[in-house]
Image (cartoon, grey):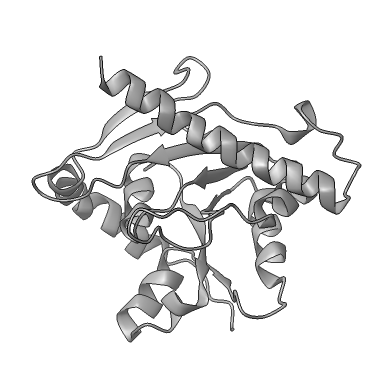
Amino acid sequence: MKKKKMNLFFLWFMKITGWLGAVVFFKPKIYYMNRKKQGRRIKGACILMSNHVSLWDFFLYLLIFVERNIRFLMAEILFTKNPFMTFLCYATGGIYVNRDAVNMSFLKESLETLKKGGVVGIFPQGRVAVKGKTWPFKPGIVSIALHSGAPILPVYTDGNYGIFKQTHVMIGEKIYLKDYFDIEDTSEENIRKMTQFLQDKTFELKDEMERRMRK
């Protein structure tokens, strides 16, 4: 897949003009695990990690973290869905991931983005939830984190999207895998443990968010 540049003019036009629509459609209620340590401003290179409920997740985070141009890893099917979707994927800086091929070009592009101080967005489940069923995290995010040394920002959304609904989002604190694991150990078992750890951290946000919502 030929690499194309992000269309910054289109991206910011979409953010600015989409603000009102986002307020109406998402009506986001945002919670923080620790706002003193991490708010909506993302500083420096970072990997944004989230559960995956819907394609709307992409637009939600582009608007919540409006100050940063997040480059999301996107499945190959989105790039070939239709001409407009193809344009949208490239214009917003989408990083092409072919889930059916042994192709690590997405890793190189992600590392280049992080090296330049950018933000890479990853939905480690690899696909949206189906009828409430969630998928386990895949280890790709661990590989990107280990090779880049960038922190991981966990975020959770309940995906409650719609004009007559309200979306709830919980933003966690940045995670450095080196603080919890021996990152020199690249064995399959250690990678599995790190992947599970990140999955648990993401869904801890869900539990905390639901606890606060019940208050």
Residue 40 visible to the viewer: no
Q: Percent x, y for residue 173?
A: 55, 26
Specify whether 146 is left or right of 162: right
Q: Where residue 167 appears, x then y in whole percent? A: 25, 40
User: Which quadrant would the C terminus be assigned to in this image?
Assistant: top left
Against 210, residue 129 (above or below) is below
| Figure label count | 0
Q: Which quadrant, please, contains the N terminus?
A: bottom right
The picture quadrant where one finds residue 184 is top right
Residue at image x 53%, y 18%?
A: 37
In-image side of 31 versus 112 (left or right): left
Give percent across and percent down for residue 214. Answer: 26, 20
Q: Is residue 14 visible?
A: yes
User: Would you identify the image quadrant in which residue 26 lies?
Assistant: top left
Q: Residue shown at 34%/61% (left/top)?
A: 55
Q: Is residue 41 above or below residue 1?
A: above
Q: Is residue 175 above or below residue 105?
A: above
User: Residue sitting at 34 percent across and 76 percent down?
Assistant: 85
For image coordinates 24% across by 45% down, the residue present is 160
Task: Tell which of 81 and 115 is nearer to you.
Answer: 81
Q: Position of residue 14 (x, y in %)?
A: 27, 58
